[in-house]
Amino acid sequence: MDKEKVIKQYQIPNCKAFCIYALYSDYDNKYFVGLTSDIRKRGLLLIYNLLSGYCTNQKLQSAFSRHPKSFHFLVLEENSDPLAAFDHANKIVQTLDTIRNGFNLVPIKKPRHAGGYSDYELTHGIDVSGINLPAYNGNAVYIITDHLTSRFYIGSTAEFENRLKTHIYTLRAGNHPNPEMQAAFSDHPDSFTFSIMHRCSTEEEARKLEAIEIQSRNAIAYGFNRTNNLKLLPIVETCKRKSTSQNSTVFFFFFDIAS
């Protein structure tokens, strides 16, 4: 993809402020309304997904595939207060009726924390609406859930905190090795949650439980998983499950919003 050509063709602004933007189709006379702190980066990533056919917003993907040259970006409002911007964005969605007569799928949800998380927060715990989620960097089976599409990814790790950071950083950078999950995250990052399914004593136990969860939930067919530790399945009978109700921790992350 020729970055400069895409920027010129789709009129992607270079506004660094937190803003409400629209991707507008002259042909359909319809809008997609979203929020971002970097419209240039967000616009390039969205256009890349649309050109590649990876956009999980089927209304937007279908219209773009028919008339890609009819689309261009608009900055509707700049706002230094991210939380206020969410209210304004929803009013715009309602006024333009972009869910019924546009390309938005759902209302834009106001986050509990409208910003990124520092290394200190990821290390020592994350304060979400007054609740501190304790840090955990041990062996674990985790699940990444896209609540908009109900798809999910199950993984295991010996260092949960470090693995979580890797997922977050690569998804935010737009270069996650799982292209389907990256495309979904780029479309609607506010719908993703990261949860611990099992805290385990050893890495081997975590890998066995991962294999069980992928198989029992059919995560390859219905989720983002592409492989399974099938060679571990004959010996998973010796691995006792941990109680998810007692050991489950959910992390909410909210990034640039495009619902």
Image (tube, grey):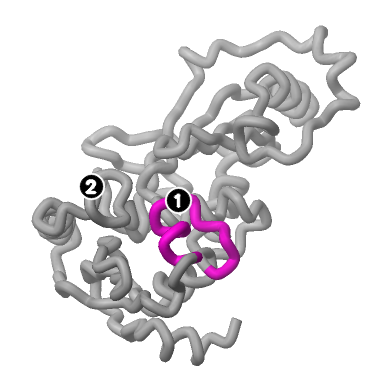
Helix, strand or loop at mark 1? helix
Q: Residue at x 73, y 40 (%)?
A: 226
- Are there few (<14), some (14-19), or many (20+) residues within 10 Å of tag 2? few
* Disc 2 from disc 1: Cα separation: 14 Å
Residue 132 belongs to magenta span? no
Q: Amino acid at mark 1?
A: Gln
Q: Which residue is mark 1?
A: 58
Drawn side of residue 198 relative to residue 157, left or right: left
| Above/below status of 133 relative to 166 | above
State which quadrant residue 112 falls in.
top left
Specify the label residue 100 is tagged with. 2
Helix, strand or loop at mark 2? loop
Drawn side of residue 212 relative to residue 187, left or right: right
Residue 61 coordinates in the image, percent (x, y)? 46, 59
Q: Main secondary structure of the magenta part?
A: helix
Q: Residue at x 53, y 29 (%)?
A: 196
| Above/below status of 79 relative to 236 | below
Residue 61 belongs to magenta span? yes
| Residue placed most toward the observer, 169 or 76 | 76
Does the rendering let one see residue 173?
Answer: no
Residue 243 coordinates in the image, percent (x, y)? 55, 11
Q: Which residues are magenta?
A: 51-65
Q: Amino acid at mark 2?
A: Arg
- Are there few (<14), some (14-19), or many (20+) residues within 10 Å of tag 1? some
| Residue placed most toward the observer, 133 or 102 | 102
State which quadrant residue 191 falls in.
top left
Q: Residue at x 89, y 15 (%)?
A: 234
Q: Are marks 2 and 1 in contact (CB under 8 Å)?
A: no
Does the rendering let one see residue 96?
Answer: yes
Residue 103 coordinates in the image, percent (x, y)? 31, 56
Q: Residue at x 66, y 35 (%)?
A: 155
